[in-house]
Image (cartoon, rainbow, N blue to C red):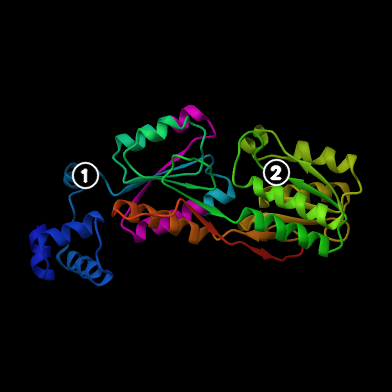
Amino acid sequence: MATLKDVARESGLTVGTVSRVLNNRGYISEKTRQKVYRVMKELNYQPNEMARSLSTQRTNTIGVIVPHIVHPYFAKMIDSLEEAAYENEYKILLFSSKRKDYLEEKYIEMCWRNRVSGAILFSGLVHTEVFKRLDFPVITIERFIDEATAGIVCDNYQGGVLATEHLIERGCRHLLHIGGVNQMQMPGDKRKVAFEKVCREHGVNYLILEPDDEYYTEMDYYAIIRPVLEQHPEIDGVFASSDLIAAQVIQICREKGIRVPEQMKIVGFDDVNIASLTTPRITTIRQPVKEMAEAAVSALNRVLAGETVAKEMRFPVTLVRREST
């Protein structure tokens, strides 16, 4: 059975350099990294994960905590994170908190006990004191946590501007914005801020619907959207904070005989697969999910290597035009 010394000898490197490659510590050129991986494959060398974790006090594992697994946005993000992690020789330890603070705190504790190299957090319900006790970096995605090492967000404000201006350009004069989460402050709130500002600037009428947390948890907005459309038949444009919500607006419009896009134009947010599966397909704001996932894993790598990373990394969004407008 091949040993670490065998890999070092065959690759012409020191044992220390090979060890740094295996543990993702310090700067290693891509050429050197690939050489070590090639020799490992040729020798069929299998790193001893248990020994490595005992010597470094870390496993090559990233804890990922999401509020949902089945939500299309989180499913897409998890898939991208897993791919980015694999490319960087990490494994994913995945938890779904169901938006319950005690579960989130429990999972953070499990990350610590499993000696993760770092955590990527999509939720932020636990008390901030919990993060001060951690000895590994925490990267947030679309969440506000001051104690986090770094935060990854899309340009939510610009997304709100693009969506609202597009509806107005398409002739809408009575707009409705449907938010996502009402009970906690989130970066996505800037979508609503941009919506209000653009509506006021253009002098169009608007309403804002902010569902209670239970709707976000259940991912079913039907009971709250239908009454609003019935009470306000003048509404001719909807900016939904997710494609999931936009799809339910289309469903309700079909039931009520409201033709999309002739009588109602709809813009979603995220550009997940559901946006291309409805009839009509949904015009939406595309988040660069793959790039955001790669940035989160890269930030963890850089922090572990002793580098400084930006406190916030913001990614641009784009408008994807489809049949709903």
Q: Can you tell which quarter of the image residue 281 is in?
A: bottom right
Residue at the location (12% across, 64% down)?
7
In the structure shown, which secondary structural element does the residue marked by tag 2 occupy? loop
Q: Nearer the viewer, residue 65 or 254?
A: 65
- Give the labeled residue for mark 1: 53
Residue 125 among magenta residues:
no
Q: Which quadrant holds the C terminus?
A: bottom right
Tag shown at residue 179: 2
Q: Nearer the viewer, residue 74 or 151?
A: 151
**Could you classify mark 2 by the number of other residues whose Cα lies within 10 Å: few (under 14), some (14-19), or many (20 or more)?**
many
Of all residues, the one furthest to the bottom in this rendering is 31
Q: Is 220 placed left or right of 77 in the picture? A: right
Q: Is residue 266 above or below residue 111?
A: below
Q: Is 202 placed left or right of 180 in the picture? A: right
Residue 80 in the image: state x and y as whole percent. 47, 57
Q: Is residue 79 above or below residue 7?
A: above
Q: Which residues are magenta?
A: 77-105
Label 2 vs label 1, nearer the camera: 2
Whether residue 282 is visible here, answered yes or no, is no
In the structure shown, which secondary structural element does the residue marked by tag 1 occupy? helix
Q: Are marks 2 and 1 in contact (CB under 8 Å)?
A: no
Which kind of residue does numbered mark 1 sit on?
Ser
Which kind of residue does numbered mark 2 sit on?
Gly
Residue 247 in the image: state x and y as whole percent. 72, 51
